[in-house]
């Protein structure tokens, strides 16, 4: 920066002006000697999800379909739009294999992530977009608290988040175009691939390229058979190979399953399988048989323990499962081979797939076949016991995980259907929450299974065991559905404490989902039940939640204060130190919003005195944040800064990324009121970076408004990269 003409010698013409939006720290100086160090933290990096199942091992000659996919992507990029391809065909024809093979081969074209959704169009209750989008948004970095509750909001947020990011989405087993449309990314250069048993004609109106997938031609089917059973075997008897793939209808799934017959039988020729002593009487060289017959053929070659496990796992409600639940279902005595051996035998027979070590999946057609074989071959009483063991396993493991995710929560003693085996333990929060998140579909399915089989006690306890997951991940639809079923189950078995717990939890879910009238009703029922039980701690908890409901509605702060004070009286009766601190903190927030600054600071200081030094940073950080904000509202900026900076320092040990954004925003307001625009901009920059990374776009826009207030001459997009 130089001197202006006519300026007195020795005086600097340096100006301390900054125009536009600057992300990250900035430095303005006339002369710099030596190094410059910025102590500000690097902004959080946007996650890059890689959700696709593994590339299929057995994929043969789908050049026409691959060409359509390539062409769709090229066209979309030339038009600066997103590609949409719908692959339709009969079950077992290889729709998902085609999609996965292409997406894996083009992974470098989608550097910002690959998303996968199993839409379960073949089930009675397909997966809706309002169940998929919260997971997609969180995978893309949106904090659970900032995922919109309603589908329209989720769709808009997803389009905003995916704009400018080259992302691939695979919607597997769709039932309708309505399931798919909300899941299409908005980015130029992105792609949405859809598989369906049905021809989704209306997607063509959205610009979809369509691949109608037929069974393989005979030569390709024989090539697939050779890849699996051995090309020498096929070359030695091409006529029989042709008859074999014809009997499979040239469906890849049937060929793959049939080829498993030869894997461990080097002495078998193809003709031996069809016409020799080992042949099955229903299989001839000229007859096209059903896929079920092919599965029967392989099933009859399984070792006894593997066949038994195959039938038992048909009772598992989901198509994916892990070794732990297979062990529970097997309940095998020591002399019977371990379930892991049986699982590997089923993988070897191509009746199970495996995506990762210890995790297995049924194709839906194979799952249905296993169910039919189990109903035909298994004892009814034994199948009932298997169901109990599956339920027991999930309840015990979910309880173990929930204890790690939410350790401070009071819980009743669990009631199991059978004496439980030693449940899985979890080393840390992330592992426990990850298991609950991965198994949510299975947990919901097992809860329904428990209710259907009349095990109502297990059904309500399963809902209760998902509390920590729902609090952290905010899957509102599943949360409300599970807790409504749990309430009905608790009522059915007369468990009043269980009903009270779940009605309170249901009220929280409804409140957070913005369904305030329903939340009020749920809390009212929970409060009556707690009072009838004489459960003072539980009563205080419900009263606190009723106060939060009034506070969240933003039009009843006085009513909120009433409920918090009622809760405080009870907390003091039972000497609940942590609870007393929480109520003082909540009352302080109410008083601060009402402009009663002295009362607010008094209550919040009382809360801080009780909680400081206890190591409970998850409570201390929000109390400090509220106290800092109360001092700011009262005009005491030095005290506000002290508490907010202390809370920010504590975030290295506890708290959330969102807390960091909130604290930087408040510190920016302190600096702005101190007439320190450079510091204010720095804090606002860091706050906005956090909010945008988390997908909290309304918060980010609010902070951008603060910055424009500092520099009224800059437009809303000035300087933004």
Image (cartoon, rainbow, N blue to C red):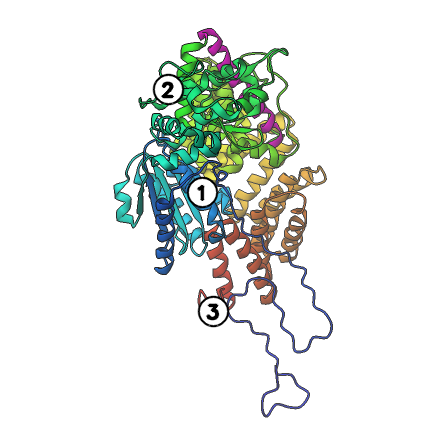
The secondary element bearing badge 2 is classed as helix
Q: Which residue is mark 2?
A: 293
> Label 3: which residue?
712
- The main secondary structure of the magenta stretch is helix
Give the residue at x 54% y 47%.
Answer: 592
Crowd around label 2: few <14 · some 14–19 · many ≥20 (10 Å): some
In the depicted structure, whether residue 313 falls above or below residue 604 = above
Residue range in magenta is 379-405
Query: Label 1: which residue?
Result: 101
Is residue 310 shown to the viewer in this render?
yes
Disc assigned to residue 299: none
Q: Real-space Cα distance between discs 1 and 3?
A: 53 Å
Looking at the rendered structure, the secondary structure element under dot 1 is: helix
Coordinates of residue 412 in the picture (x, y in percent): 58, 19
Report the residue at 51% width, 20% height from top. 461
Quarter of the figure with the N terminus: bottom right
Q: Nearer the viewer, residue 172 or 262?
A: 262
The tag earlier along the polypeptide, 1 or 3, is: 1
Considering every residue shown, the one lying at the far bottom of the view is 6
């Amino acid at each position: 920066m130089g001197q202006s003409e006519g300026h007195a010698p020795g005086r600097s013409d340096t100006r301390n002006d900054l125009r536009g939006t600057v992300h990250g720290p900035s430095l303005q100086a006339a002369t710099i000697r030596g190094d410059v160090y910025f102590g500000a933290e690097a902004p959080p990096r946007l996650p890059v999800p890689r959700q696709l199942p593994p590339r299929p091992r057995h994929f043969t000659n789908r050049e026409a379909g691959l060409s359509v996919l390539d062409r769709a992507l090229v066209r979309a990029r030339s038009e600066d739009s997103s590609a949409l391809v719908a692959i339709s065909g009969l079950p077992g024809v290889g729709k998902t294999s085609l999609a996965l093979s292409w997406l894996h081969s083009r992974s470098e074209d989608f550097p910002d992530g690959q998303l996968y959704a199993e839409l379960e169009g073949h089930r009675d209750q397909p997966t809706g977009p309002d169940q998929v989008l919260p997971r997609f948004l969180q995978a893309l970095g949106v904090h659970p608290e900032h995922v919109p509750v309603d589908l329209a909001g989720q769709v808009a947020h997803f389009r905003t988040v995916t704009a400018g990011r080259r992302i691939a989405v695979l919607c597997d087993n769709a039932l309708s175009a309505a399931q798919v449309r909300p899941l299409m990314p908005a980015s130029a250069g992105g792609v949405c691939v859809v598989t369906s048993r049905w021809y989704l004609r209306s997607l063509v109106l959205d610009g979809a390229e369509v691949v109608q997938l037929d069974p393989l031609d005979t030569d390709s089917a024989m090539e697939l058979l050779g890849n699996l059973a051995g090309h020498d075997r096929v070359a030695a008897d091409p006529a029989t190979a042709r008859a074999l793939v014809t009997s499979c209808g040239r469906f890849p799934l049937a060929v793959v399953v049939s080829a498993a017959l030869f894997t461990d039988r080097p002495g078998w020729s193809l003709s031996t399988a069809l016409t020799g002593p080992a042949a099955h009487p229903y299989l001839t060289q000229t007859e096209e048989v059903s896929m079920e017959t092919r599965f029967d053929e392989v099933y009859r070659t399984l070792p006894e323990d593997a066949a038994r496990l195959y039938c038992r796992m048909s009772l598992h409600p989901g198509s994916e499962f892990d070794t732990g639940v297979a062990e529970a279902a097997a309940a095998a005595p020591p002399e019977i081979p371990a379930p892991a051996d049986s699982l590997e035998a089923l993988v070897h027979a191509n009746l199970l797939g495996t995506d990762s070590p210890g995790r297995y999946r049924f194709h839906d057609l194979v799952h249905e076949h296993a169910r039919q074989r189990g109903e035909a071959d298994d004892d009814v009483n034994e199948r009932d016991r298997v169901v109990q063991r599956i339920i027991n396993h999930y309840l015990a493991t979910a309880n173990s995980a929930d204890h790690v995710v939410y350790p401070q929560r009071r819980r009743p003693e669990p009631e199991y259907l059978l004496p439980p085996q030693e449940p899985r333990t979890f080393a840390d929060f992330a592992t426990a929450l990850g298991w609950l998140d991965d198994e949510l579909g299975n947990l919901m399915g097992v809860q329904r299974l428990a209710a259907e089989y009349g095990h109502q006690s297990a059904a309500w306890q399963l809902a209760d065991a998902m509390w920590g997951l729902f609090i952290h991940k905010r899957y509102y639809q599943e949360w409300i559905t599970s807790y409504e079923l749990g309430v009905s189950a608790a009522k059915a078995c007369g468990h009043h404490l269980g009903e009270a717990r779940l009605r309170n939890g249901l009220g929280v879910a409804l409140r957070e989902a913005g369904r305030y009238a329903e939340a009020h009703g749920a809390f009212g029922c929970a409060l009556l039940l707690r009072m009838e039980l004489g459960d003072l701690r539980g009563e205080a908890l419900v009263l606190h939640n009723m106060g939060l409901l009034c506070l969240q509605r933003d039009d009843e702060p006085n009513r909120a204060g009433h409920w918090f004070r009622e809760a405080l009286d009870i907390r003091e009766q039972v000497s609940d130190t942590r609870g007393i601190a929480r109520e003082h903190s909540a009352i302080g927030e109410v008083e601060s919003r009402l402009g009663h600054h002295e009362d607010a600071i008094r209550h919040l200081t009382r809360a801080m005195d009780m909680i400081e030094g206890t190591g409970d940073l998850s409570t201390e950080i929000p109390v400090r944040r509220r106290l800092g904000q109360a001092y700011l509202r009262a005009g005491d900026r030095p005290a506000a800064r002290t508490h907010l900076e202390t809370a920010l320092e504590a975030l290295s040990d506890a708290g959330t990324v969102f807390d960091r954004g909130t604290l930087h925003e408040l510190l920016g307001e302190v600096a702005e009121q101190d007439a320190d625009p450079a510091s204010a901009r720095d804090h606002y920059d860091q706050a906005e970076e956090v909010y945008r990374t988390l997908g909290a776009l309304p918060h980010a826009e609010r902070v951008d408004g603060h910055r424009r207030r500092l520099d009224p001459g800059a437009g809303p997009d000035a300087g933004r990269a």
